[in-house]
Amino acid sequence: MVKFSQLLDKATSESLLEPDLALNLEIVDAIRGGDVTGKEAVRLIRKRMLNSNPNISLRTLIVLEMVVKNCSSPVQSEIATQAAMNDMKRLIQNGTTPVKQKALELIQTWGHAFQKEPSYRVVPYTYNELRMEHEFPAFHPESDAMFVADKAPEWAEGDTCHRCRVGFSLTVRRHHCRACGQIFCHQCSSKTRSLPKLGIEKEVRVCDHCYDSESGAKDTASGAAGGDVDVLVKQAISNADISPEEEVRRALERDASLASATPAPRPAASGPSASDHEQQLKEEEELQLALAISMSEQESAKKSISSAHTVPLPADTQPSSSLYDHSVAEAPEQVDPMAQYIASASREQEVRPQKKQQQQQRRQQQEQQQ
């Protein structure tokens, strides 16, 4: 009892700049753990909230709010009394503005939450009575979610951890999971999370099993596959100690390896196609034509050079009779390279079908041999 009173004084100290959530949860744990009865806890809280210091009154109202939300009927039945409602009225009439607003907020929340509970009807009556005299703050429907949510489980008792079976001692303290109510050591209940289904908005202590169960339910609801999550977690752990440049380089190497693993398309046929063969013949013809033109140009150049170096005849040399009788001597017949190429090209056109047929026969023989 003395320990609870000291804890309450510490959690509602006037030196606190803001509410201490850890101390408030210790008060809740003390009530739920049976260290103090709900009746005695509410009596001490009511006495503390009527303190003349407005800071102490405001901190005590915040503690009362958490206790009523999380300690269920042992505390709620003590609040739903005419004496407790009269203390709230005194705070509303004589308290400062912050204290008055907080008291009105609590009365409004409790009035909506307990309106269907016949044994708590004094709270809705007080709320309706104060509505005629005072202006209440805007009501948020989610504020009474703590009272309509599933009830928190009763706390189990034991001398060993429910999971690892280690015995409790002065060095190994016992802790309760707010989700399942079982008793655990610190190592098996070191995680925290909010429990909306139980009306607990703040993050509170839960065991490893309840934490993993809640996390798995959220992953399933979001459509995340368990295997994919494990792969992503392992990849994130492996990349935690590398630089961004190294991570980019690894990603590029992974993409290159995937691209090289893609099989290349196989050729349609093992040998050259008919279109490739025709293209080859066309290129040979163009090469032969270029060679023939080059040879013709060289021949013309030789003729011009020989005519430029012709030696003139002596003066006493008598001209031949051909110069006087105007008869034209027949020049020796010369072969035109262009005409020669055209003739050879014509012969090539004639024998080409035969060559093609011979090549096809050779390919067929090779395929048969293979």
Image (cartoon, rainbow, N blue to C red):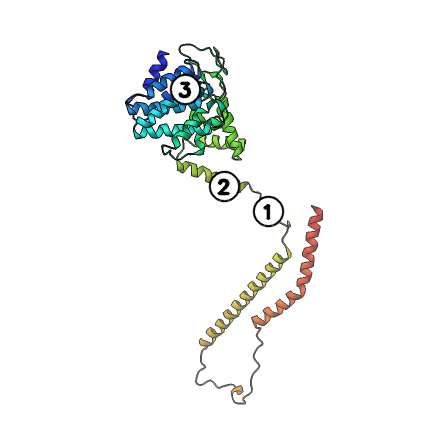
The residue at 41%/16% (across/down) is: 39
Rendered image: mark on residue 256:
2
Residue 92 appears left or right of 80: left
Question: Which residue has dot 1 on it?
Answer: 265
Element class at badge 3: helix
The residue at 39%/14% (across/down) is: 40
Q: Quadrant of the N terminus?
A: top left
Query: How far is the residue under mark 2 from the one under mark 1?
Result: 18 Å
Mark 2: amino acid: Ala
Element class at badge 1: loop
Task: Indicate the quadrant where residue 9 lies.
Answer: top left
- Image location of residue 305, percent across then percent down: 46, 73
Mark 1: amino acid: Pro
Mark 3: amino acid: Val
Question: Which residue has dot 3 on it?
Answer: 28
Residue 342 appears in the figure = yes
- Image location of residue 363, percent across then percent down: 68, 52
- Image location of residue 108, percent across then percent down: 41, 30
The residue at 32%/27% (across/down) is: 93
- Image location of residue 321, percent across then percent down: 53, 87
Residue 177 appears in the figure = no
Q: For the residues labelled 2 and 1, say whether their Cβ atoms are less than 8 Å apart.
A: no
Q: Nearer the viewer, mark 3 or mark 2?
A: 3
